[in-house]
Image (cartoon, rainbow, N blue to C red):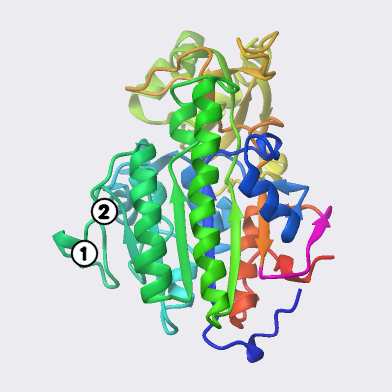
Amino acid sequence: MSVMSSQKQNPMVVLVCCDALNRDWIDPVRTPVLSRLAARGRWFAQHEAVFPSVTRVSAASIATGCVPSRHGLHGNRMGLFEHGKVRVYDVGHPDFRHHMRRATGRTLKVPTLAERVAGMRGFVAMSNVSPGAAYFLDPDHFGTVYHRAGSFLPGGDPVPEADALSIGQDFDGDRQMTARFCEEVLRARKPSVAVLWLAHPDATLHGAPLGSPAHLASLRHADACVSEVVTTVDALRDAGDDVLLIVRSDHGQETIGDSVDIEAWLGAQGLAAFVERGDIAVAAQGTSALIYATETGRPAFLGILDRLREQPWVGTVETGERLIRRGVSTQEGVVAAIDMGYLPGGNDFGVRGKRWAAAEPGKVKTPGFGEPGGWGPDETRPFLIVECGGDAALVTRPTSLIDIAPTVLDFLGVPAPDMQGQSVLKFQ
């Protein structure tokens, strides 16, 4: 695959995310467009998610080329220290960035793609997932981000109302967004980096079983949206534009078997006062959870660690160096990560992987529906296709979400020595 940027005229990278599409669901029958694209481009057979395997932290890792311990966004829910105590916030809310800045003095700890290409032809993203996942692609407004909860120009001014992304988080919303993306962003504006992040299959699976007719319909839907982007990219290339197309997902999902309130369990172990004071806090991540503690709460939590590991709803509990190897910082209050346990059997459509889920305030964890978050096999196998008009290949070398940003910058000719990932354009 030729990547000599000096030979390119106005190169552009197009990034498409089919949220929660595990690569095992891609085949010529269910996803014919993705299958053909994989055959004509580079298919990365060992592509891996980050931990937690959730959308918001995945967006930050894709945007920065770094794992959570480096970029600073811990998961879909995150604990922040306020007045010496831990308070857990939902990262998906539009205002989470303001809470993060107030508590830490910043948003992400490292530059994003949007910042790195701001001096070129810029960064434009259209996203139909949660506001937090959309905004952490560019939390400090170096580029333009469109989202149904609010769209922002470089510098942070709102996009004019007539140009807002007024869509629903349904199939029709994804289709409208894709049409606008192809016409307005790719054909007209041609930024250095253009991102399209589809809501489905993820939004479908939070309300339907894996393998169900609804899930299969969401696969066809995502495939059709990708088809429109591929057609547009091919037309741009025919007109002489240099375009690198990256189509991928961020994680997969597994099936909820049951759920448990971890904070209530901690209370039953005699730690209710620590939880109430904010000396111990649980940030549920679906099929995993992060445990936070202050210096006061840490010894109390560690005192019940052996009991925690014995619970039937616990798969694995990691602390210390093992936590660091997962890409989780132990310097920001996190003392443990729980990968939730498995339950026997599969779902009603024969899909394996029934999991315990960690309860979240205000959300119902419905047995049988999909859920990501942990490091189970089905939730950590996203797909990655990189295509630039030639050099088809099957790449078996392991890759990760943190390799995407270095790949983008490599194609654009922008050095990125401080990123933890590597450009996959060099992989054989």
Q: Main secondary structure of the magenta part?
A: loop
Rendered image: mark on residue 159: 1
Q: Relative to residue 391, is residue 106 drawn left or right?
A: left
Please rate how many residues cluster around mark 1, counting C-alpha atoms within 10 Å: few if below 14, some from 14 to 19, many from 20: some
Q: Relative to residue 143, is residue 426 drawn left or right?
A: right
One can see residue 416 in this view: no
Q: Which image quadrant is residue 130 in? A: top left
Per the rendered image, the range of residues in magenta is: 388-397
Amino acid under disc 1:
Val
Rendered image: mark on residue 416: none
Q: Is residue 252 above or below residue 398?
A: above
Is-magenta flag for residue 386? no
Residue 348 drawn at (x, y percent): 60, 10
Q: Do callouts 1 and 2 mark residues in contact (Cβ within 8 Å)? A: yes
Residue 57 drawn at (x, y percent): 50, 47
| Label 2 SS | loop
Residue 227 drawn at (x, y percent): 54, 53
Amino acid under disc 2:
Leu
